[in-house]
Amino acid sequence: MEDSQSRGTPSNMNYTPKRAPNNLYRSYGAGAGLTSVRKGKLTSLKLPTSREIPKARDLSEKDPEQISKLTEKNWNLYYVTPLYKFLYTGLKSYSRQLSAFIVAEKQKGIAVEVGLETNFKVNFSIIQGLTEIKEDAEAVFIQICSKPKFATEAMAETVVWSGWLSCVNGNTEYLSSMPPEFTCLPLFCANGAETMTALVTTWFQRTFDCNFGPLRIGSNSLCWLAAMWTGCEPEMGIRYLKLSWSLPCSPPLNVSFTVHPGDAWELWRSIRQDQVRMTIEEVDQFMSCIESHFFRHFKIHLSAGELIDVSTSLGSAHRDGKIKLMSSHYMPGILTLLTESAFVMMPI
């Protein structure tokens, strides 16, 4: 993602960003507010070695309209440091401020990729039902629509960009140590043009004194996702399990392997020792068995490469930080893993 902090302050704007003086997030982190956390375990936080087996739970029952906006879209992932003085009561004001920011940037000649004669409408809203523990902050959804200036009232608006911030099963040690002025929503998902994403993240950084960074999905997390989605087969039916590796060859070689869902489930069931939790040892054994089966047939050591992509009918994920969720039933487990990844990547 482009280093959006290098941009100048937009001219002719109708709002005043509420900057935290002298970057309060960093001063709190180095001072009294977060000192214990920075000197504690969180400074070397790693992904857990075991986690609860995801259970089917249809989130759309609580907020069907909002949850439906999260599925069947390709999301680019980012981590976000805590937001300073973000208020849920200010969502309408934020909608107006971000809209004014986009218009001002467009007037300066910043490419927005939706045409010059276009009006923008921004809407901030809360996504109900994503929080798992009391320390989690409510997820926030942002939608940007466009409409030609001289369009008729009957002409529908076009969604040109959408994104959301969330915290699902966040690190309780960190969250409980946060000063009250901060709101922690470490996972940011964006769908739309990169130029629009850069504008949105720039506005957030200037308004809430936070920082964004790209969130890659490591091979370890992809293995977890492969096992978690395979575990959904009896209840949801994953239809297929497709895995892709990048092998260190010259030229580079990518290998894709599709496993029958029934075979994948039988293998995973034979490995699991507990009906409540799954461990990294079980996940590693699951992946090792798949790689060994591939070697017997094709004499290629997939373990010499890197897992880069996992795909089923319930969702897909790529190491470059792209994910697609096709169902809300197992969303909490997936978002918990991504939240953990965001905490690991987030500078503290």
Image (cartoon, grey):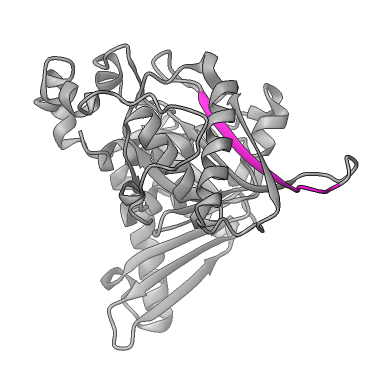
Q: Residue at x 55, y 50 (%)?
A: 107
- The image shows residue 8, relative to residue 30, as above or below, that is below
Give the left or right position of residue 36, taking residue 200 as reference. left
The residue closer to the viewer here, 20 or 210, is 20
The residue positioned farthest toward the bottom in the image shown: 250
Q: 69 above or below 263? A: above
**Location of residue 160 in the rendering, given as x and y in whole percent from the top left corner:** 65, 50
| Residue at point 88%, 45% (across, down) | 152
Query: Horizontal and vertical percent for residue 269?
Result: 47, 46
Q: Where does the image place residue 79, in percent across and percent down from the top left?
A: 36, 41
Residue 268 seen in render:
no
Magenta range: 139-151
Q: Quadrant of residue 22?
A: top left
Residue 92 is left or right of residue 186, and the answer is: right
Residue 101 in view of the camera: yes
Residue 228 is covered by the magenta coloring: no
